[in-house]
Amino acid sequence: MANLLLLSYAFQPDNTPAAARPSQLFRYLPEFGVEPFVFASSAEGGINPETSVWRVPAERESAGLAAASAAARVFMRFAAPYNDRLPWVPYAAAAAARLIRTRKIDAIYSTSPFLASHFAALWLKGKFGLPWIADFQDPVCDNPFRNRNWFYPYDPLLERRIFERADRVIANTDAIAEVWRKRYPACRDAISVLWNSYDPDEAIEQVPSAERGHRVLAHIGTLYGGRHPGQLLGSLKRLGTSAETLRVKLIGPIDEAVMSAYGAFMTAMSDVVEVNNTLVPREEALRETAEADCLLLLDVNERNTAFQVPSKLLDYIRIGKPILAYTPADSPVDRILQQSGIAHVVIAPDMSDAEADRRVQEFLSLPLTAREPSAWFVQTFSARTQASTVAAMVHGLVNPRPRPVRKVRPSTERPLIVTTVDAEEAFDWDKPLSRDFHNVGSMNEQFVLHRVFDRFGIVPTYFVTYPIVMEPDGYAFLAECLKAGKCRIGAQLHPWVTPPYEEVVNAYNSFAGNLPEALERDKLSALTEAIAARFGQRPVAYRAGRYGVGPNTVKTLTALGYRVDSSVVPEFSYHATGGPTFFGRPTTPYWLDPDRRVLELPLTSTYIGQLSSGNWRHLANGLFENDARHALSRSLMARTGLMERIRLTPEGTNVSDAKRLVRALLKRGTRTFTLSYHTPSLLPGNTPYVRSRADRDRFVGWFEEFYDFFLGEIGGVPATVEDVYEQARVTCKDLTPALP
């Protein structure tokens, strides 16, 4: 189930057409594997019992958010031409960000006509990098009711910014989608059509026409801007239509501009035209629609453009009564009516008075029998159909088709960055080890970094321990990523939690290379088989837990079919706690056996500084052999630029230092860099490196800044462990045949 953040200023029970789309998606998306979490405005007075619908702002909000909202209100009042509900944006963005940080959210869906939802989504996209679908229930630049040309740059700038950042853009008619594809050719493939829809589970009552001497022609909805009944009223006056043959009911609010232009006209024809200038609840609107003999649709505007479909058209068609539609020829409304199966007459706004009058007479002669909508209409405009379309978009963005494995050309000179992850159970680093350590909850937080990985094209290798493989919370996320081609799976042996359980649990035996050869092999074999059974493929890359390789490790890896070891940490020593020492080990890949079957891909670490080479290396080894000793000396050496040891990891290494490390090694000829971190670090409180949510934000920011540096400034490319192995088979002749 994909989790979708849905931003919509309006949401049912708000009495506005803008609330229909998000409410229908909320209802039907779960049928197609998408769980929506909604943020809507509390300003409209709506209250929702659903636990996954939040109205913001809440009763109590922080002073900072209130100030930001006030600033947005001032901007909207004095610098923006339309009421786009900007004061809502800070509250919505902040509340949604809190949800993203605490729950696995896979994508963002924002829907207008109120652009505030898109503004909030735009900020969240920049903050978290999530896939974003921007749904326009009304267009921006092509909206005939956004016609304040004195502020012309406003709409084009906003529209272009949204199109540049959104991953998918939705139009609600094919006409506007085609305009956008011509305007934004680079986004052509990202533009889709999602028609307005009806709720198939909402009962629509078809009421036979009443026995009366006149016909009732009803329009239900707001009249505003260029959407007015002037053309109809002109025909009725010229035709001399009387109340004995026709009554026109205009039910819904009428704005001042329409009343100013046509109020006197309507008053003069009050025997024929009945005006109810109030907003009625949806139930009453449907009842009035059903009880009318025939229905009036006004799809007209000052520009005579033909882009939109009034949502009431769907109600009209489902009720089945004859429809008189004022709309441009070949407009979306015209084309829908032609295939709807409902009796109708269309009058274009540029039609001559004589032709318009003739068509009104034709309409008034139609039989009043209600018809059933066509099968095409029922299927195309069902909210269930539209939800399936949106769900397909979400799944396509969250789980794109597996990308083919990119082969690194042996001749490449561009630096490679290999991202590796120690996927392991959480444990207290300051307490004795125990076989009871099986807390793998941090795996549910890895999605936070995958947003960064996806943005930069990184395919990490997860070195998984036995508890990760055996616990659902451990393997579920990885299985999804593997299926989508977003990760690789390797093995990481933690002896104390891997069967067979024959050894004493202590610090010395926590290094697998210290175990008897047969026991090390049996434990790694058990882990290997468990990975193969769980993920459907045998691992070929290995990392010893605590980097604890030993004299028999290469032999064991060869026997079990492994191709790559990534346990060596150059210039680090774990001798003080019983582990191996890696002083003097190369920072570039090398073969571990004469037959070139097992490649060592060392983690990236080394000494840098004025005294980092030559005879001074022995001094460095003495300073760094035991982390508990010589701390002051190491600090002074680093501060003076004489010598320091840096490792490529966000755990304890500043990103500025990581950049210095890369630059130094590039000068020495290193072209392959191995970055690593531990999965528990993404759950605050598990490791010394991430104690709070703020720490985690900085942790994630480390990756963003480093990848931007490595792939941008340095000109490097991402690579997988398998990429490096394939390249090494052709180019690497180096042999360092023994592990410690």
Image (spheres, rainbow, N blue to C red):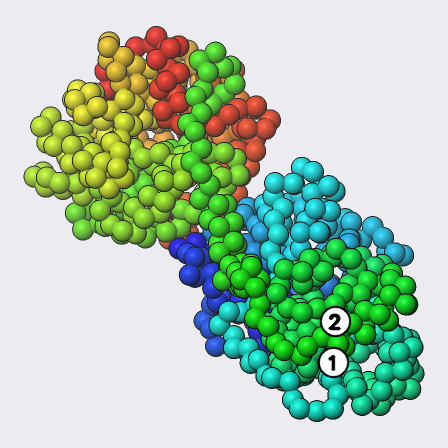
Q: Position of residue 500 (x, y in %)?
A: 10, 39
Residue at screen point 67% across, 63% down: 337
| Residue 580 falls left or right of residue 295 | left
Question: Which of the 4 quarters of the picture holds residue 277?
Answer: bottom right
Crowd rating for badge 1 (residues with CA inside 10 Å; few <14, some 14–19, many 20+): many
| Residue 527 falls left or right of residue 608 | left
Real-space Cα separation, disc 2 to disc 1, in angstroms = 9 Å
Secondary structure under tag 1 reads strand
Q: Which mark is residue 324?
A: 2
Residue at screen point 74% across, 80% down: 217
Report which residue position mark 1 lands on: 217
Quarter occupied by the C terminus:
top left
Q: Is residue 554 visible?
A: yes
Q: Position of residue 702 (x, y in %)?
A: 51, 40
For badge 2, the amino acid type reads: Leu
Asked whether the beta carbons under mark 2 and mark 1 sit within 8 Å of each other, the answer is yes
